[in-house]
């Protein structure tokens, strides 16, 4: 029996490897306190290197790692807690919040279309990344509806989330965006749940607004992206 066959019989190999890799990434970031040392990014690198060195197939790893996805729903629901605590802030800034997120969604689509035109990218590739800034479940649904490639969508969602969490705080400082509401909306609308995990570190208001941005951006993306694609 080879190592793939042996580990494929274990329900938790992939889960344990994923959690251990993230723990290592978390400790590295905690020690060196560098923005680019994002725990999730480090965990991805560790898992890839481990699988390459050991020769363990991705399918074997995924057999156990897939159980982590079961925790996504309750974790996402938990994001409503900081939003509830900042309900007064939400009511006070409701119009500005909705308008800014809507502008962000339209701008995102416009930038991708411009990049596609400049680099003469394939239309199907454009359709595959149009929904990259929302959660995976919504992104895959939108991509399937407009005829994109879902595998590319998953990569786009991961890149958007990790890059936002890594360079988002730096960009906020660079452009002197100090308003907590604006910081949270920017992180959530651009980098969905992964960006929100970083927004939580910035403060309670940022966490609440980022959580709201995930929901509103997801809804607007479902409406805007198919409409924009219909004109291409």
Image: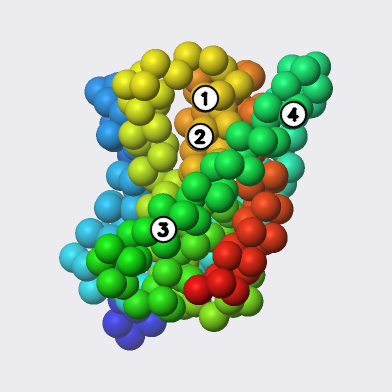
In the picture, the disc for residue 95 is 4
Among the 4 quarters of the image, the one containing residue 224: bottom right
The first of marks 3 and 2 along the sequence is 3
Give percent across and percent down for residue 150.
49, 74
**Whole-number angstrom distance, CA of label 3 to CA of label 4:** 26 Å
Instruction: For the residues labelled 3 and 2, say whether their Cβ atoms are less than 8 Å apart.
Output: no
Looking at the image, is mark 4 or mark 1 nearer the viewer?
4
In the picture, the disc for residue 112 is 3
Instruction: State whether residue 141 is above or below residue 81.
Output: below
SS state under label 4: helix
The first of marks 1 and 3 along the sequence is 3
Is 184 or 130 nearer to us in this picture? 130
SS state under label 3: helix
Residue at 33% of width from left, 66% of height from top?
Answer: 117
SS state under label 2: helix
Looking at the image, is mark 4 or mark 2 nearer the viewer?
4
In the picture, the disc for residue 119 is none
Instruction: For the residues labelled 1 and 2, say whether their Cβ atoms are less than 8 Å apart.
Output: yes
The first of marks 4 and 1 along the sequence is 4
Work out which residue is located at the far left of the displayed protein and give it: 53
Residue at 81% of width from left, 22% of height from top?
Answer: 91
The first of marks 4 and 2 along the sequence is 4
Q: Is residue 67 left or right of residue 222?
A: left
């Amino acid at each position: 029996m080879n190592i793939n066959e042996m580990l494929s019989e274990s329900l938790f190999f992939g889960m344990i490897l994923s959690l251990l890799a993230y723990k290592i990434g978390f400790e590295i970031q905690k020690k060196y306190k560098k923005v680019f040392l994002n725990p999730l990014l480090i965990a991805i690198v560790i898992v890839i290197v481990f699988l390459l060195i050991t020769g363990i197939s991705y399918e074997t790893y995924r057999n156990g790692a897939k159980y982590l996805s079961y925790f996504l729903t309750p974790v996402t629901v938990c994001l409503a807690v900081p939003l509830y605590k900042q309900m007064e802030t939400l009511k006070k800034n409701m119009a500005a919040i909705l308008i800014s997120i809507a502008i962000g969604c339209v701008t995102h689509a416009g930038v991708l279309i411009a990049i596609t035109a400049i680099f003469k990218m394939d239309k199907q590739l454009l359709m595959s990344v149009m929904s990259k800034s929302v959660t995976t479940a919504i992104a895959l649904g939108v991509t399937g509806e407009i005829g994109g490639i879902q595998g590319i969508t998953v990569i786009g969602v991961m890149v958007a989330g990790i890059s936002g969490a890594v360079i988002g705080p730096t960009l906020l400082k660079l452009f002197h965006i100090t308003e907590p509401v604006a910081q949270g909306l920017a992180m959530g609308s651009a980098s969905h749940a992964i960006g929100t995990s970083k927004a939580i570190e910035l403060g309670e208001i940022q966490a609440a607004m980022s959580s709201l941005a995930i929901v509103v951006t997801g809804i607007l993306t479902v409406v805007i992206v198919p409409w924009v694609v219909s004109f291409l």
